[in-house]
Amino acid sequence: MKGKQVQAHLRPEPTNDYDSNAILVEINHGEGFKLLGYIARELTRSLNPLLGNQIVSVGIQHIKFMTTFLNIGYYITIIITKKGPWDNSIIKKSKSVK
């Protein structure tokens, strides 16, 4: 499936029991949008206000499977483009997400 075009978008989930700022990541690779996962909690409070009209595009750079101790699963690099420059605090937070 390497090189296959995949659409992605972000959707807030204010009714989430664990994080009222939760943001879903959904992808469509030809069969409709399906839940892929969530944006890291460290970033949701900063990203949520941008979802209305500031986010220009969302893309998946790569998906990899890892079997690191207690962190087994798929890890995705998401590229989010917004209007104007990113605030330095968001850039700093994004670098600390594992």
Image: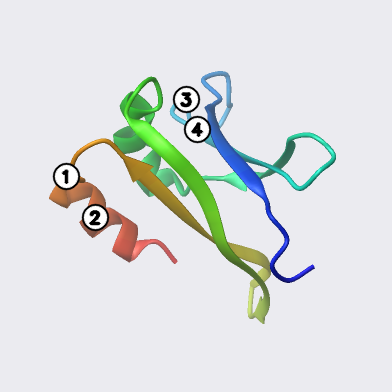
Badge 1: few (under 14), some or many (20 or more) residues near its Cα, within 10 Å?
Answer: few
Residue located beneath label 1 in the image: 87
SS for tag 1?
A: loop
Q: Earlier in the sequence, mark 1 or mark 3?
A: 3
Q: Earlier in the sequence, mark 3 or mark 2?
A: 3
Where 9 falls versus 1 (above or below)?
above
**Residue drawn at 41 percent across, 47 percent down:** 80
Q: Earlier in the sequence, mark 4 or mark 1?
A: 4
Measured in 3D between alpha carbons, the distance from the residue under mark 4 to the one under mark 2, in whole angstroms, is 18 Å
Return the mark for residue 22.
4
Q: Which amino acid does the dot numbered 2 rest on?
A: Ile
Q: Which amino acid does the dot numbered 4 rest on?
A: Ala
Residue located beneath label 3 in the image: 20
Closer to the camera in the image, 85 or 4: 4
Scheme by which the image is coloured: rainbow
Where does the image place residue 90, in percent across and percent down from the top left? 24, 48
Where 17 falls versus 57 (above or below)?
above
Measured in 3D between alpha carbons, the distance from the residue under mark 3 to the one under mark 2, in whole angstroms, is 22 Å
- Marks 4,3: beta carbons within 8 A: yes
Of circles 4 and 2, the one toward us is 2
Q: Earlier in the sequence, mark 4 or mark 2?
A: 4
Residue located beneath label 2 in the image: 91
**Residue drawn at 32 percent across, 25 percent down:** 49
Q: Quadrant where the C terminus lies?
A: bottom left
- Marks 1,2: beta carbons within 8 A: yes
